[in-house]
Structure formats: structure tokens, C-alpha cells
Image (cartoon, rainbow, N blue to C red):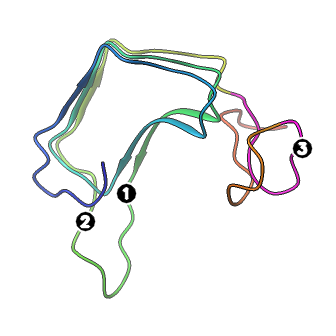
Amino acid sequence: MSFCPEANALVAENETSANAFGIFVDNSSKARMLRNTCHGNSAGLLLLNQTYEGELPGGVNDCLVAENELRGNGLLSGEGNPNGLGEAGPPISGWASR
């Protein structure tokens, strides 16, 4: 979900794998991510709080992340990664370092 200041969304009991982002909440508030399984993605669960001049007001506020299983989210993706997800943007990976 993206730029939903009053999302009131429930993302529950899903399984994601082999994606750049398993679950991605971009500048959205009042969302609940419960009991999801995210494995083999570049990033398992990402809440991105960013605002840019000229865009709608945003931010991530009042969200609940609980009882999720996040494991093995180290898939490489992005620029120059022939064994990953390809040229989907800048390099990303769930691991802190490579």
C-alpha cells in the first residue's frame, strides 16, 4: 500500500517469496501486518517513512507488526545482479551486509 494516511488495512496470513519486497507499506498509516510468512525475498517486510516536497502528506504512523515469520530474506536484486531479480532499481537485499 502506498500513500494512504488512513489505510486501516489488514495484511494477514499471507506467504511471500522471491520478491523484491515481501510486504511493502509506503507512507501509509493505521495498517496491521499480522501472522505473515516472508521468506526468500530481498526485504521481507518494509515500512518506508519518507516524504518529498510536492507530494501528498505521508509517513508511517500507528501501524502494528506482530506475529510475522521473517526468514532468509537475502535475495539480491537491482543493478548488476544476474543471479537476482534483475535490473529493478538500486541494489537491495535483506542482509545488513554482503
- Classify 10 Å Cα crowding around label 2: few (below 14), some (14-19), many (20 and above): some
Specify the principal SS of the magenta part: loop
Residue 39 image-quadrant placement: top right
CA–CA distance in space, label 1 to label 2: 8 Å
Disc number lying in front (3 or 1):
3
- Check disc 3 and report the residue beneath it: 82
Name the spot of residue 4 as percent of width and height, x first: 19, 56
23 is higher (above) or lower (below) than 12 = below
Tell me the magenta residue range: 74-83
Sequence-first tag of 3 and 2:
2
Residue 11 image-quadrant placement: top left
In the image, what residue type sits under mark 3?
Pro
Name the spot of residue 90 as percent of width and height, x first: 71, 59
Identified at 63% across, 27% down, the residue is: 18
In the image, what residue type sits under mark 1?
Asn
- Classify 10 Å Cα crowding around label 3: few (below 14), some (14-19), many (20 and above): few
Position of 59 with respect to 15 (left or right) is left
In the image, what residue type sits under mark 2?
Gly
Sequence-first tag of 1 and 2:
1
Quarter of the image containing the C terminus? Answer: top right
Name the spot of residue 83 as percent of width and height, x first: 87, 36
Q: Residue 49, which numbered label? A: 1
CA–CA distance in space, label 3 to label 1: 30 Å
- Check disc 2 and report the residue beneath it: 58
Local secondary structure at mark 2: loop
Local secondary structure at mark 3: loop
